Amino acid sequence: MQDYIRKINYYETDKMGITHHSNYVRLMEEARVDFLEQAGCSYESMEKAGIISPVIGIECQYKKPTTFGQSVRVCVKITEYKRVKLTFSYTMLDENDQVVFSAKSHHCFVNSSGMPIALSKHFPQYDEIIKNYVSEE
């Protein structure tokens, strides 16, 4: 699995020239979407199949600031999967491989009516893909 790499844009910084804290959540989402596409179960294909995966919680730690023009590398892992719930972990590194941010996002799976669904029962093809990418922290 390839890490997600992206430069910090000027509009993502605050008055002090530091990446605004809210933009790290956007980077998490970009990296998660990229991870799932690489795994073979893109958000687009899951939504077409009737699967929605909302965020139900986020935990994050800001370790070191980033600034405009700086590249960050986001390492994404699936650290927990329980049929209806899924947890991703994220480690963002600067150009010197120093950790600048770490986080987890917790998700669930629901159908288009908002009812929780177990992938293993309703969408076994996605269940198998996700199980193959679960790793220890």
Image: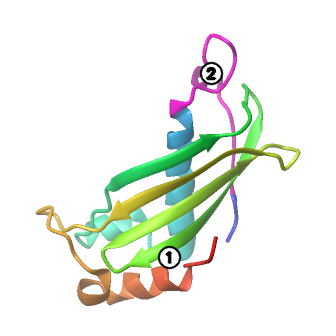
Magenta stretch: includes residue 13: yes
Q: Residue 66, position in %: x, y?
A: 73, 31
Tell me if I can see residue 106 in this picture: yes
In the picture, residue 65 is in which quadrant? top right
Mark 2 belongs to which amino acid? Thr
In the picture, residue 55 is in which quadrant? bottom left
User: Is there CB contact under 8 Å for labels 2 and 1?
Assistant: no
**SS for dot 2:** loop
Give the residue pinned by disc 2. Answer: 13
Q: Residue 107, position in %: x, y?
A: 37, 61
Image point (50%, 67%), residue name: 36
Image point (31%, 65%), residue name: 108
Q: Residue 40, position in %: x, y?
A: 50, 76
Image point (76%, 40%), residue name: 71
Image point (38%, 52%), residue name: 57
Graded by Cα atoms within 10 Å as few (under 14), some (14 to 19) or many (20 or more), the crowding at tag 1 reads few
Residue 91 relative to residue 118: left or right? right
Query: What color scheme is it?
Result: rainbow
Rounded to the nearest whole Å, what is the CA distance between mark 2 and mark 1?
33 Å
Q: Earlier in the sequence, mark 2 or mark 1?
A: 2
Give the residue pinned by disc 1. Answer: 40
Magenta span of residues:
4-22
- Placement of the N terminus among the 4 image quadrants: bottom right
In the image, residue 52 sits, relative to residue 82, either above or below, namely: above
